[in-house]
């Protein structure tokens, strides 16, 4: 999992949202499962044990913890600023726990297709392993916002704009 690439439209990088570090990592794990040639989202199934190990979660009550994390993730709406509209959306449309198999199945919200599938321009790519060690939700977001401008060499933020992007009231 650690060698996989995350490819996100810059509209997603610039979207306004606030997720916990674990919630962000789950979204990034899912995004890293998308292949550049994919034309549709798939059902992304992960053994819970693999997620616990990858996210370095204590396996004691990790199952209950993951249910709370996914429930929280399903409840959070974020905003994508488009050239002609504002889109309010959820990252995932469902999280299904397969009790007998010890796995969880995720589905992206279908409205996210233009921001994660068949990306040809205005997107940012980085290795999943570069962010999984971050402990803070803000450090993950800052990494993405800066990575987006890596080739430019610098980036300046208006403090109010940065607070909005990071979901800081």
Image: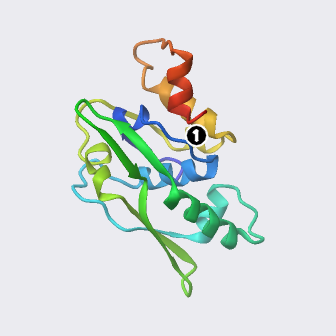
Furthest residue in direction front, as rendered: 169
Left or right of 31? Residue 25 is right
Q: Secondary structure at mark 1?
A: helix
Residue 120, compared with residue 102, is above or below; it is above
Q: Quadrant of the C terminus?
A: top right
Residue 139 position in % (x across, y down)? 62, 33
Residue at horizontal 36%, vertical 32%? 10
Q: Is residue 157 left or right of 89 when viewed as pictured?
A: right
Q: Percent x, y for residue 87?
A: 33, 43
Identity of the residue furthest to the bottom in this view? 100
How is the rendered protein coloured?
A: rainbow
The vertical placement of 126 against 38, above or below, is above
- Is 160 in front, or is 107? 160
Q: Is residue 154 rendered to the left or right of residue 88? A: right
Q: Residue at x 62, y 52 (%)?
A: 22
| Position of residue 167 measured from the top left corner of the image (x, y, whole percent) | 56, 36
């Amino acid at each position: 999992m650690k060698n996989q690439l995350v490819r996100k439209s810059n509209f997603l990088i610039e979207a306004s949202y606030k997720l916990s570090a674990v919630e962000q990592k789950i979204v990034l794990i899912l995004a890293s499962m998308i292949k550049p040639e994919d034309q549709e989202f798939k059902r992304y199934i992960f053994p819970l044990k693999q997620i616990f190990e990858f996210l370095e979660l204590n396996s004691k009550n990790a199952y209950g913890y993951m249910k709370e994390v996914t429930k929280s993730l399903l409840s959070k709406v974020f905003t994508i600023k488009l050239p002609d509209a504002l889109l309010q959306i959820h990252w995932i449309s469902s999280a299904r726990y397969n009790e007998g198999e010890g796995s969880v199945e995720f589905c992206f919200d279908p409205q996210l297709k233009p921001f994660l599938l068949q990306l040809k321009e205005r997107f940012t790519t980085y290795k999943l392993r570069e962010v999984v060690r971050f402990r803070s939700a803000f450090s993950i977001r800052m990494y993405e916002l800066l990575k987006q401008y890596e080739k430019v060499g610098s980036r300046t933020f208006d403090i109010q704009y940065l607070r909005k992007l990071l979901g800081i009231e």
